[in-house]
Image: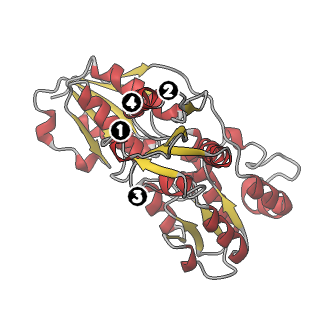
Amino acid sequence: MATKVLLAEPRGFCAGVEMAIKALTWMVQVFESPVYCYHEIVHNGAVVHAFQEAGVVFVDDISEVPEGMPVMLSAHGSAPDIVEAAQNGASVMIDAVCPLVTKVHHEVRRMADKGYDIIYVGHEGHDEAIGAMAEAPMVTQLVDPRVGLDTFSAGTDAKVALLAQTTLGLYEWEDVLSDAETRFPDLWTARKSDLCYATTNRQAAIQELAERSDLLLVVGSENSSNTKALVRVGTNAGVPAYRVDSADDIDPAWLKGASVVGVTAGASAPDQRVQKVIERISPTEGVEMVRVTSEDEYFPLPPNLRRFMGALQPLVEGGFACQTPGVSGLVENDRNFTATEALAILGV
């Protein structure tokens, strides 16, 4: 029986996920169903199911969105042709791409324009990798961090730039970076790593948990890259680590002989799921918070959503967000309105 749970802080929703969930919540409040979303808004089954129940239809092909319907593009970023098709066909198109992913898109375009061959470190088939590489497909090559640079070939006397999927494990990025710097002495990389602050913070937190835990549980879905990176970091630290989507996924055998259980969550996992996991563990001595840093990052709602909501503000706030005329509503106070509260509107 577990005596204590060590709970990582920070964990769970990052600023990009907060923004995307709140943005899609506004969409389902404003428009009659169905509202369409290109790709899962974030990679978490519970969040996706909640929005499906609220009338959102997730599609993997933008042509599946009927002309004239509202559509949102996911937090992972979309290829330029997808953005253009959505703009041309939808009544309202909202791009909920994470600003940190947008930064990588800009870097891909900029380095391609300067004549660089681009190494993009990422995972084959991941939505973020597909969208970023589509910015300059003729000069960008995907390098899987598990394989390394063996698959990359640069042109004669080519200039080489190194960019990355934001949700990689830090160790994955550093391994490829080290090899690339050796192979290409004039390698260009961004001054600040492309890795998301939340990704690196959560990886630092699970390393701290690993030093004191007999078992590590990471809450998140199978298709969440950053969640699986957390499991790998924990395993690499020498502690049994498992991903669970919910408390029902916990194998009782894992808990045998585990006195201290470390718990964290990927950047798209609702904290409600984390609390249910803790309840299932039922530690006899309670929960200890393990904080490695504080996060206060905030990403505003997408600009075109803010403009759209500004036009509808009196009507929407009168019916939902602000019962008192003249009092600021949730759009103005978005910084203080959390994704957890948004999901609660949907019954999560």
Residues under numbered marks 2 and 1 in contact, where contact means CB atoms less than 8 Å apart: no
The residue that mark 4 highlights is 179
Q: Position of residue 331 (x, y in %)?
A: 75, 49
Q: Position of residue 345 (x, y in %)?
A: 57, 56
Q: Nearer the N terminus, badge 2 or badge 4?
A: 4
Element under disc 1: helix
Q: Nearer the N terminus, badge 4 or badge 3?
A: 3
Mark nearer the viewer, 3 or 2: 2
The extreme front residue here reads 156
Residue at the image position 57 percent from the left and 27 percent from the top = 295
Residues under numbered marks 1 and 4 in contact, where contact means CB atoms less than 8 Å apart: no
The residue that mark 3 highlights is 125
Image side of residue 325 versus residue 340, left or right: right
Residues under numbered marks 2 and 4 in contact, where contact means CB atoms less than 8 Å apart: no
Inspect the image, locate mark 1, and give the three-letter code of the amino acid beneath it. Ala
Q: Position of residue 141 (x, y in %)?
A: 46, 50
Against 204, residue 144 (above or below) is: below
Inspect the image, locate mark 3, and give the three-letter code of the amino acid beneath it. Gly
The image quarter in which residue 88 lies: bottom right
Inspect the image, locate mark 2, and give the three-letter code of the amino acid beneath it. Pro
Q: Nearer the viewer, residue 132 or 26?
A: 132
Mark 4 surroundings within 10 Å by alpha-carbon count, few (fewer than 14), some (14 through 19), many (20 or more): few
The image quarter in which residue 204 lies: top left
The extreme bottom residue here reads 67
Q: For marks 2 and 1, give the CA distance.
A: 29 Å
The residue that mark 2 highlights is 185
Mark 2 surroundings within 10 Å by alpha-carbon count, few (fewer than 14), some (14 through 19), many (20 or more): few
* Residue 76 appears anywhere in the view: no
Image side of residue 95 versus residue 197, left or right: right
Image side of residue 223 versus residue 216, left or right: right
Element under disc 3: loop
